[in-house]
Image (cartoon, grey):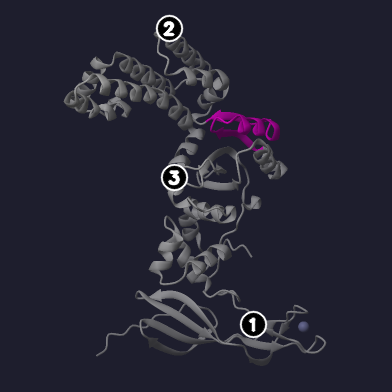
Amino acid sequence: MPANIEIPLGLPEIRIIETEQSGREIVITIESTREWAICGRCGEEIREFHSYGRQLRLRHLPILGRPVMLEIRPKRFRCPRCEGNPTTTQKLEWYDERSPNTKAYDQWLLLQLIGSTITDVARKEQTTGDVVIGAVRRRIAAQVNWDEIKELGTVGLDEIALKKGHRDFVAILTTRLANGELKLLGVLPDRKQETVESFLHSIPEELRQSVREVCIDMHEGYANAIKRALPQARVVADRFHVAKNYRDCADKLRLEVQRELKASLTKEEYQAVKGTMWLFRRNPRELDKEESAQLALLFECAPDLKQAHQWREKLTGIFETDHTKQSATAAIKRWMKGIGSSGLRCFDSFLTTLNNWLDEITNFFVNRQSSGFVEGFNNKVKVLKRRCYGITNLSHLFQRLFLDLEGYRLWRQSTTRYGAHHASS
Ligand SMILES: [Zn+2]
């Protein structure tokens, strides 16, 4: 007895005429059972059957891992009321006229594309990159729909490099909605003040007023744009970027010391010391006993490095303490003073940053939970960056970032079996 199964096709108002297997492909010939269309001219329901249109071949969801093609000849109806009795092709909800895929298959492609690349999805689905890109264009809006957002609250402004090593940055605006979801608001062609400002001005007035704080990387242009377009919002220097800034300072010294030791030590001695250098960058509380001992040995060779390490950790400690803005400001000022009298020069550039941005940096302590999302977003973006290299079309970049950030949520929320909830049409 053959082991066959019967499963519903799941498309409404459809009759199956024939099912055949062609190689690995399953080809299903279907016909619409709907007996009417909407006249393209007068918009009235018309029921006078005219003819069948040209046959369409639509790719649909795979069955048991095998590709599925649907073949259908759309019905055409004639309008008895309009002059000249024009005919209209019946439109069905589960596919678009000019698409080679059903809507369900478009969504299937998008699901595969989350966390992946166009090339990879095309290869796995044995289709072309253009077909995958087509699904992105049809199903994902190229910009945010402000109507879907009630309130903005905290907004994050970050950037990603479009090409490895290039100074070619685009600015990315995100927000976290009241329910905790991360939402992409915009991808801007550059990080110039006027670009950011004009985008912020494009936010509907009421929403713009709802922005309470904006977390930014420390760019003058960003800060100025926010002050002008969102005067009520608090500017918060993103802790992630602040930390990177002072950690890089300490690391510069490490590289200097490394060079000096290379010149002064024997090859064997240097190799031993060099092997412990990575411990310097780690969080000291995460080191085991042996690693801590190795690090202490390194610090014996380089006392300056020990100092830089201590000051770096002291600052991290301030950010990890539950300070008020006021007490944090006092603590950071003490830190600045301490550095000044320590004789260490490696933090000089960071001291300048602190002098210029102290207000924004300590704004982090006003509402530290809310700025945490930018950090979370940063980690996500780090993963996305790789895949975004080379995407120079900003609309496409918006769609891809949108998909990676919100794709799974949309998939979960999908209530219709064959519709799209975010179609750009
Ligand atoms: Zn008509």
Evaluate if marks 1 and 2 touch, with contact meaning CB atoms under 8 Å apart: no
Label placed on residue 90: 1
Q: Nearer the viewer, residue 392 or 44?
A: 392
Whether residue 365 appears in magenta in the rendering, the answer is no
- Closest to the camera, between mark 1 and mark 3, is 3
Q: CA distance from mark 1 to mark 2?
A: 81 Å
Q: Is residue 293 above or below residue 226?
A: above
Q: Is 408 left or right of 287, judged from the image as shown?
A: right
Q: Amino acid at mark 3?
A: Lys
Give the extent of the magenta segment. 210-237
Q: Nearer the viewer, mark 2 or mark 3?
A: 2
- The secondary element bearing badge 2 is classed as helix
Q: Nearer the viewer, residue 116 or 286?
A: 116
Which structural element holds mark 3? helix
Instruction: Residue 376: give x, y in percent of width and height.
Output: 45, 40
Q: In what quadrant does ligand 1 lie?
A: bottom right
- Rate crowding at label 2 as few (under 14), some (14 to 19) or many (20 or more) other CA atoms within 10 Å: few
Q: Which residue is mark 2?
A: 341
Residue 172 left/right relative to 50: left
Left or right of 38? Residue 22 is: left
Q: Does the CB distance between marks 1 and 3 fall below 8 Å?
A: no
- Image location (x, y in percent) of residue 274: 24, 28
Look at mark 3 in the image and give the residue it sits on.
380
Q: Residue at x 55, y 38 (%)?
A: 156
- Give how far apart the Cα atoms at labels 1 and 3 are: 44 Å
